């Protein structure tokens, strides 16, 4: 019984620490969202060439606002387009670096993946990726020419 209790406690602790980061740099704005077990936080910034180069710093500053670190993120959801070639390419590179350094899983979604859904919101993306079986750690970008 003690073993079961410890196993259950471990599962509850892990569930509490499920933090998800959503990154969308495909459009006119950089959009970031953190989904924790208790809260949802988001920011937007202009999507400029200067901000492409500072994406890692923007993400770090955003996490710092809520006392989180990259190591606290369990899953990253990244918009693969359609959209800005430079924005998508840069955000994918950043996420791949996070994956290599921290072994965090990532999911590359497109709003086109959810075209059967009405009123898709960013906070629903993790559940929609599960529903539509978006494969983890797979990148297939969609660029606008």
Image (spheres, helix red, strand yellow):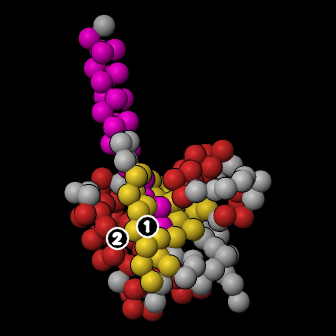
What are the residue bounds of the magenta stretch? 2-23
Q: How far apart are labels 1 and 2 at the CA level?
A: 8 Å
Residue labelled with disc 2: 59
Q: Secondary structure at mark 1?
A: strand
| Residue 80 spot, x, y in % from top left | 60, 71
Query: In this rendering, would 145 be left or right of 60?
Result: right
Please give the name of the residue rendered at 38% of the width and 42% of the height, measured from the top-left corner. Answer: 37
Quarter-of-image position of residue 115: bottom right
Please give the name of the residue rendered at 34% of the width and 70% of the height, measured from the top-left corner. Answer: 59
Residue labelled with disc 1: 32
Vertical arrangement, residue 132 with respect to residue 66, above or below: above
Q: Secondary structure at mark 2?
A: helix
In front here: 43 or 101?
43
In front here: 88 or 30?
30
Please give the name of the residue rendered at 22% of the width and 57% of the height, measured from the top-left corner. Answer: 67
Vertical arrangement, residue 16 with respect to residue 9, above or below: below
As for residue 17 lying within the magenta part, the answer is yes
As for residue 101 lying within the magenta part, the answer is no
Query: In this rendering, would 32 be left or right of 9?
Result: right
Is disc 1 surrounded by few (<14), some (14 to 19) or many (20+) residues within 10 Å? many
Please give the name of the residue rendered at 36% of the width and 54% of the height, measured from the top-left corner. Answer: 73
| Residue 49 spot, x, y in % from top left | 45, 92
Q: Is residue 31 visible?
A: yes
The answer to whether mark 1 and mark 2 are in CB contact below 8 A is yes
Is disc 2 surrounded by few (<14), some (14 to 19) or many (20+) residues within 10 Å? some
**Prevalent SS, magenta region:** helix
Quarter-of-image position of residue 27: bottom right
Vertical arrangement, residue 63 with respect to residue 50, above or below: above
Q: Is residue 93 visible?
A: no
In front here: 7 or 15?
15
């Amino acid at each position: 019984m003690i073993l079961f209790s410890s196993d259950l406690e471990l599962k509850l602790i892990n569930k509490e620490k499920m933090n998800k980061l959503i990154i969308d740099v495909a459009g006119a704005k950089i959009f970031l969202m953190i989904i924790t077990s208790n809260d949802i936080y988001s920011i937007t910034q202009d999507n400029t060439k200067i901000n492409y180069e500072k994406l890692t710093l923007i993400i770090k500053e955003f996490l710092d606002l809520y006392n989180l670190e990259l190591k606290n993120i369990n899953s990253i959801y990244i918009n693969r387009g359609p959209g800005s070639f430079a924005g998508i390419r840069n955000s994918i590179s950043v996420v791949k670096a996070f994956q290599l350094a921290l072994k965090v899983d990532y999911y590359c979604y497109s709003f086109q993946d959810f075209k059967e859904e009405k009123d898709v919101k960013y906070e629903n993306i993790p559940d929609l990726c599960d529903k539509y079986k978006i494969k983890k750690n797979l990148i297939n970008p969609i660029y606008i020419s």
